[in-house]
């Protein structure tokens, strides 16, 4: 395959298929998962090296390549993701088939709508820009070892390794091709309910932590998360996402239950205040149960201006590529845009891939949408780096 042909529909579809055929699913090892690290080191890194680009790996295994003048004072970060949702119940998740749909041919496979379609578009654009001598700003391509972790650790490591902090950032992930003007953040809150174990034939001899967890869920179910209401994102939410009990034994009154709650944050909300509020409510659980509350992974909310630099370059890039002006939206999900904005980098989640396809058993991406996404990235970067 010729590098200069990567923006062509067949070449882009083939590139997306190559990425999907190299599994990199989320496991309990998160960024340290060998399959994720191998995808970065054995699939993508050789591509960039073959294009003559110097690369490096940071302490979390993310891959970084930089283009443009080394003495530029400002840069643009193109952040992509290696990790995908697990195969789950999807048939042939890594076969990377080209399937027919009523809207045209599509690439089918795990992660293609969420991370790997946007990655393919980003790689095609990097290949196109690698020989440009007229770039005025630094372009940083980063393939993060994250993608499904729900925390900023990998993004923090990438940004801290850069000599020149970026002022604009694309968080390359499927967004129906729309530019995210903002998104909710998230803090996971772990609550452990303690009781006293006994044989289940004499339940009165123990204190069942399951009963305490049920009481706790009733307390939190009645919570109204008052405060600011975002005009597009509405109110914050609190959702139970996990429950597990111990000891792992038959016929035993449980002495420990661990619950995890997902507390979504609106732009401008204080995560410390949000955590303390839930902590105070959890401590209303009466005796004889014991309760312990801990902070889990956290992601910042995000908001950018509709008349800011990001949208100006996105609109200019669309026009230059003959595309309709980009639509905008607000997302209830959380990724790394919020962290980048906190670092002074105006960033948005943006890329080819329909969000309703994420984690489904028939995840796919239309080739036409993949091509449009690559053109949109190219137009944006040509405008932002000029």
Image (tube, rainbow, N blue to C red):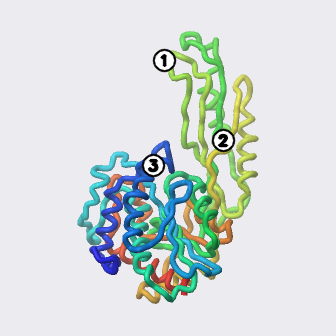
Q: Position of residue 11 (x, y in %)?
A: 29, 73
Question: Residue 220, which numbered label?
Answer: 2
Q: CA distance from mark 3 to mark 2?
A: 30 Å
Going from N to C along the chain, the mark reached first, 1 or 2, is 2
Residue 250 higher or lower than 112, as above or below: above
Going from N to C along the chain, the mark reached first, 1 or 3, is 3
**Foreground of the two, 87 or 233:** 87
Q: Which residue is mark 1?
A: 250
Q: CA distance from mark 1 to mark 2?
A: 29 Å
Q: Is residue 47 left or right of residue 195?
A: left
- Give yes or no for contact between labels 1 and 2 (Cβ–Cβ under 8 Å): no
Which residue appears at 59% of the width and 65% of the height? 337
Which residue appears at 62% of the width and 49% of the height? 297
Which residue appears at 44% of the width and 69% of the height? 176
- Disc 1 is placed on an element classified as loop
Count residues near mark 1 (Cα–Cα under 10 Å), then give few for <14, some for 14-19, many for 20+. few
Going from N to C along the chain, the mark reached first, 3 or 2, is 3
Front label number (3 vs 2): 3
**Foreground of the two, 16 or 206:** 16
Q: Quadrant of residue 240?
A: top right
- Disc 2 is placed on an element classified as helix
Q: Position of residue 232 (x, y in %)?
A: 60, 67
- Tell me the quarter of the image containing the C terminus: bottom right
Question: Residue 26, which numbered label?
Answer: 3
Q: Position of residue 116 (x, y in %)?
A: 40, 63
Which residue appears at 50% of the width and 53% of the height? 148
Count residues near mark 3 (Cα–Cα under 10 Å), then give few for <14, some for 14-19, many for 20+. many
Q: Quadrant of residue 53?
A: bottom left
Q: Quadrant of residue 210?
A: top right
Residue 1 higher or lower than 223, as above or below: below
């Amino acid at each position: 395959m010729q590098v200069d042909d990567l923006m062509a529909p067949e070449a882009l579809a083939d590139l997306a298929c190559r990425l999907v055929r190299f599994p990199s699913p989320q496991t309990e090892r998160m960024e340290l998962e060998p399959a994720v690290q191998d995808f970065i080191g054995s699939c993508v890194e050789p591509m960039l090296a073959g294009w003559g680009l110097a690369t490096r790996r940071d302490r979390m295994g993310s891959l970084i390549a930089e283009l443009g003048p080394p003495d530029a004072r400002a840069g643009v970060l193109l952040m992509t993701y290696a990790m995908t949702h697990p195969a789950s119940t999807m048939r042939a998740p890594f076969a990377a088939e080209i399937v027919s749909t009523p809207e045209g041919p599509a690439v089918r496979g795990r992660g293609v709508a969420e991370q790997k379609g946007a990655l393919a578009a980003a790689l095609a654009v990097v290949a196109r820009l690698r020989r440009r001598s007229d770039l005025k700003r630094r372009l940083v391509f980063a393939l993060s070892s994250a993608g499904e972790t729900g925390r900023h650790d990998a993004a923090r490591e990438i940004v801290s390794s850069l000599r020149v902090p970026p002022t604009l950032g694309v968080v390359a992930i499927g967004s129906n091709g729309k530019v995210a003007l903002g998104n909710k953040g998230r803090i996971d809150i772990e609550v452990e309910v303690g009781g006293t174990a006994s044989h289940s034939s004499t339940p009165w001899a123990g204190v069942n932590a399951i009963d305490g967890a049920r009481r706790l869920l009733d307390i939190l179910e009645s919570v109204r998360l008052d405060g600011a209401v975002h005009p597009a994102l509405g109110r914050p939410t609190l959702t139970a996402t996990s429950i597990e009990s111990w000891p792992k034994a038959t016929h035993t009154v449980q002495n420990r239950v661990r619950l995890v709650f997902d507390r979504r944050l609106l732009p401008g909300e204080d995560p410390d205040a949000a955590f303390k509020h839930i902590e105070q409510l959890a401590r209303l659980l009466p005796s004889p149960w014991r309760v312990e509350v801990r902070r889990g992974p956290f992601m910042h909310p995000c908001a950018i201006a509709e008349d800011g630099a990001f949208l100006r370059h996105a609109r200019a890039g669309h026009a230059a590529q003959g595309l309709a002006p980009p639509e905008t939206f607000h997302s209830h999900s959380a990724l790394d845009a919020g962290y980048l904005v906190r670092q002074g980098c105006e960033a948005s989640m943006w890329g080819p891939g329909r969000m309703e396809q994420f984690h489904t058993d028939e995840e796919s991406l239309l080739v036409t949408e993949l091509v449009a996404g690559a053109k949109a990235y190219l137009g944006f970067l040509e405008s932002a780096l000029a």
